[in-house]
Amino acid sequence: MTHSDDREEFERNKIEQSLELGKDAALFERSKKMALELDTYDYSYLWSWMGVPIIQFPADVMATQEVIWNTKPDVIIETGVARGGSVIFMASLLEVIGKGKVIGVDIDIRAHNRESIENHPMSKRVALIEGGSVDDDLLERVRAEIPEGARVMVVLDSDHSRDHVLAECRAYGPMVTEGCYLVVADTLVGHLTEDEAPKKRSQVWYKGNEPLSALKDYLDETDRFEVDPVLNGKLVLSSSPGGYLKCRKA
């Protein structure tokens, strides 16, 4: 028995369902409540990538994988290294693709986290830069790591206060090249009231002083980026819904 090639139909259905899912406000609210309940168990802290803790929701890991595979950047810049799993994750994808490097930026790369990264098999595709992510001297060091003509993607996942994220958008947004992505992490916080926001960590962000507010303000300043409706549409049980921006022009 022969079967017709249904790959195009399969992809069309994915797009249609993603767009419809993105319109389902009631389901998004239920997803948000589930994410808050999961946070009681430090859900995003329970995962690792190739032996290194990756502090991410699985849906965000999958979304980032799709972006990297589809766009194949030469350089990925991530602000906020934490324990290093996300840097290693992205470096491993570049290794499979066969090119590129990840530039990990953090104001404080602790010795044990640096050791985990630098002793990992994927360290050959990682460059770590310590310092304030929007400091002029650090930005110069980042630019020096980008080869001429490179395709560049950026992930912002450090200090999540509105002013800092907006400053990062302004500093790193111009580095993103046409067709690649700027990812603003933890936009879910922008959908939380002060009462809903988790209180167990050292800093509390909620609607108004968080990444989503910064993202919206940045989009008002530039026409280079657009929110990817298909990718963001399927981001339920995610910490970064609406946070995946595609650069649409040089």
Image: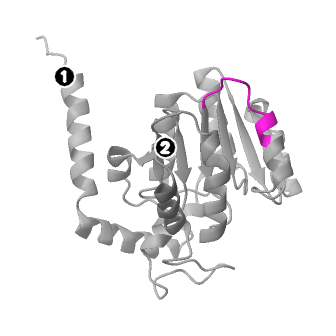
Residue furthest top in the image: 2
Q: Residue at x 48, y 35 (%)?
A: 249
Q: Residue at x 86, y 50 (%)?
A: 137
The span picked out in magenta is: 142-151
Looking at the image, is mark 2 or mark 1 earlier in the sequence? 1
Q: How is the image coloured?
A: one colour
Question: What is the spatial separation of the Cα atoms under label 2 and label 1, in whole angstroms?
Answer: 35 Å
Q: Where residue 7 sits in the image (x, y, percent)?
A: 24, 23
> Is 216 one of the magenta-colored residues?
no
Within 10 Å of the Cα at label 1, are there few (<14), some (14-19), or many (20+) other Cα atoms? Answer: few
Left or right: 104 as drawn, with respect to 86: right
| Amino acid type of the residue that numbered disc 1 sits on in the rendered structure | Asp
* Residue occupied by mark 1: 6
Q: Residue at x 53, y 58 (%)?
A: 218
Provide the secondary structure element on which disc 1 rests.
loop
Q: Image quarter for residue 34?
A: bottom left
Q: Which quadrant is the N terminus positioned in?
A: top left
* Residue occupied by mark 2: 224
Numbered tag placed on residue 117 in the rendering? none
Q: Where residue 150 sits in the image (x, y, percent)?
A: 65, 26
Q: Residue at x 50, y 51 (%)?
A: 222
Q: Nearer the viewer, residue 158 or 142?
A: 142
Left or right: 42 as drawn, with respect to 216: right
Q: Main secondary structure of the magenta part?
A: loop
Residue furthest left in the image: 1
Within 10 Å of the Cα at label 2, are there few (<14), some (14-19), or many (20+) other Cα atoms? Answer: some
- Asked if marks 2 and 1 touch (Cβ < 8 Å), the reply is no
Q: Where residue 99 sits in the image (x, y, percent)?
A: 66, 22
Q: Which dot, 2 or 1, sits closer to the camera?
A: 2
